[in-house]
Amino acid sequence: MRANVLKRKISLRIKRKKRIRAKISGCATLPRISVFKSNRTLYIQAIDDVKNVTLAAADGHKLGIKANKEGAKKIGAEFAKTLKAQKIEEGVFDRNGYVYHGVIAALAESLRENGIRL
């Protein structure tokens, strides 16, 4: 029973992810900012979909940041510094199928507070 519930949750997230990705894309001047969330850490990257290149990335595991709201704010601030160093001021936020609340919302708000327009 438990495995079926987990499979359903994952399949629903993948459906949401595909629906979102059909509508958004990134380029060098307006990259797609994609988020992956595991139970322990957060990963975020800026992607140029035209050239299929990652422009910038931040890894919560390497920074020693946990996947909670406070950690999301810290990783958002670090990622904003990385983007500003590459002269990227705005991007398209890809929540990757996750519901926009809690950690994902805190990460997006942190990026906005640090000068990245989403």
Image (cartoon, rainbow, N blue to C red):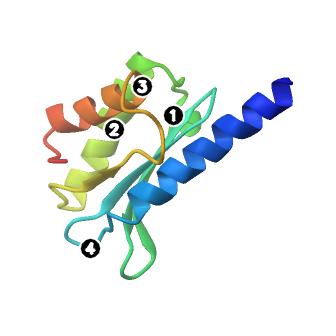
How far apart marks 3 and 2 lie (CA) works out to: 16 Å
Closer to the observer: label 1 or label 4?
4
How far apart marks 2 and 4 lie (CA) works out to: 20 Å
Q: Residue at x 56, y 43 (%)?
A: 13
Q: Disc 1 marks which residue?
A: 63
Q: From the viewer's perspective, is 116 left or right of 83?
A: left
Q: Nearer the viewer, residue 36 or 71?
A: 36
Q: Disc 4 marks which residue?
A: 28
Q: Disc 2 marks which residue?
A: 78
- Which label's residue is closer to the chain start, 3 or 1? 1
Residues marked 1 and 4 touching at CB (< 8 Å):
no
Q: Give percent across and percent down for residue 39.
A: 63, 27
- Which label's residue is closer to the chain start, 2 or 4? 4
Q: Residues within 10 Å of mark 1 (few under 14, many from 20)?
A: few
- Which label's residue is closer to the chain start, 1 or 4? 4
Closer to the observer: label 3 or label 4?
3
Q: Disc 3 marks which residue?
A: 103
Q: Amino acid at mark 3?
A: Val
SS of the residue under disc 2? helix
SS of the residue under disc 3? helix
Residues marked 3 and 4 touching at CB (< 8 Å):
no
